[in-house]
Image (tube, grey):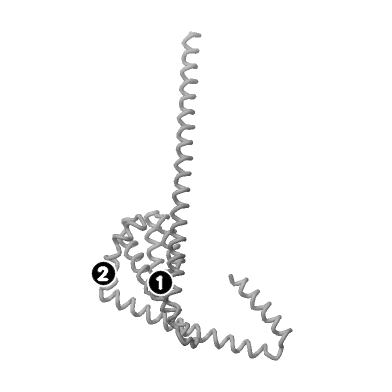
Amino acid sequence: MNAVFCTIFIVSAAVLAFAAPQDFLTSLLSGARTSLNTALTLFCVYAVWMGLAAVAEECGITKKAAKALRPLCFKIFKSKNEEACSAAAMNLTCDLLGAGASTPFAVKAIGEFEKEGNAYAQKLLFIINCAGFQLIPSTVIALRAEMGSAAAADIFLPSLVCSFATLAVSVTLYILTEKISSKKCRKNNGNKRKEFAAHLKDKERKTAGNGKGAAWRS
């Protein structure tokens, strides 16, 4: 990705320098100013949500939320690891609220799932996070407000519908592909067992035939 972004920047700068050299320096300074403002806005949003997450964890709200979602996580991720399901529950809660503090919980949950060898849960949690389903897209609203939007919260309903549709389609496709691959694995294992059983029978026949031949010669 670094190579891609560097290529885009170099090509864009070359085109701008050739087409409008008088605007080259102005555009660079304007772009740097916009990038810095966006980075500071995101930093503030993440700092607030990370602070709230830390307070919630200290007050025990995190454990209560995780306890409420834990039965659902056990079923969804097919896991009995309480640490993993608690972290996954907090990750889902932060994602639903649009908080920027969800990534550490996802990393912890995936690490715990990896310890128990639950690849299904790892992939499913990754897909859910990539879908980006949010009840309150607070980060996007904050960015729109920073950019001077007259109605920053208008993104709420379109974001809710699009993110829910993305989540439903992605999870459904993943479950279907997992079922298809598991059926193929069972079929291949069944064929291998049949081949192994046939090989054993042939070996027994050959052994029995050799035994009869030796008895006849004696």
Residue 167 location, x and y as percent? 44, 64
Q: Are marks 1 and 2 in contact (CB under 8 Å)?
A: no
Q: Residue at x 31, y 56 (%)?
A: 80
Which residue is labeled 1 in the image? 134
Closer to the camera in the image, 78 or 156: 156
| Residue type, mark 1 in image | Gln
Counting residues from the start of the chain, the first of labels 1 and 2 encountered is: 2
Image quadrant of residue 81?
Answer: bottom left
Residue 129 location, x and y as percent? 43, 66
Q: Is residue 188 left or right of residue 8?
A: left
Figure check: 53 above or below 76 = below
Closer to the camera in the image, 143 or 58: 143
| Residue type, mark 2 in image | Lys
Near mark 1 (Cα within 10 A), the count class, few <14, some 14-19 or many ≥20, is many
Figure check: 81 above or below 22 = above
Query: Mark 1, mark 2: which one is toward the viewer?
Result: 1
Near mark 2 (Cα within 10 A), the count class, few <14, some 14-19 or many ≥20, is some
Which residue is labeled 2 in the image? 64
* Kind of element beneath mark 2: helix
Q: Gap in Å between the C-alphas at discs 1 and 2?
A: 20 Å
Closer to the camera in the image, 173 or 63: 173
* Kind of element beneath mark 1: loop
Q: Residue at x 63, y 75 (%)?
A: 6
Q: Residue at x 42, y 59 (%)?
A: 124
Closer to the camera in the image, 187 or 207: 187
Check residue 43 in the rendering and tell me which mark sits there, or answer none: none
Q: Residue at x 65, y 89 (%)?
A: 25
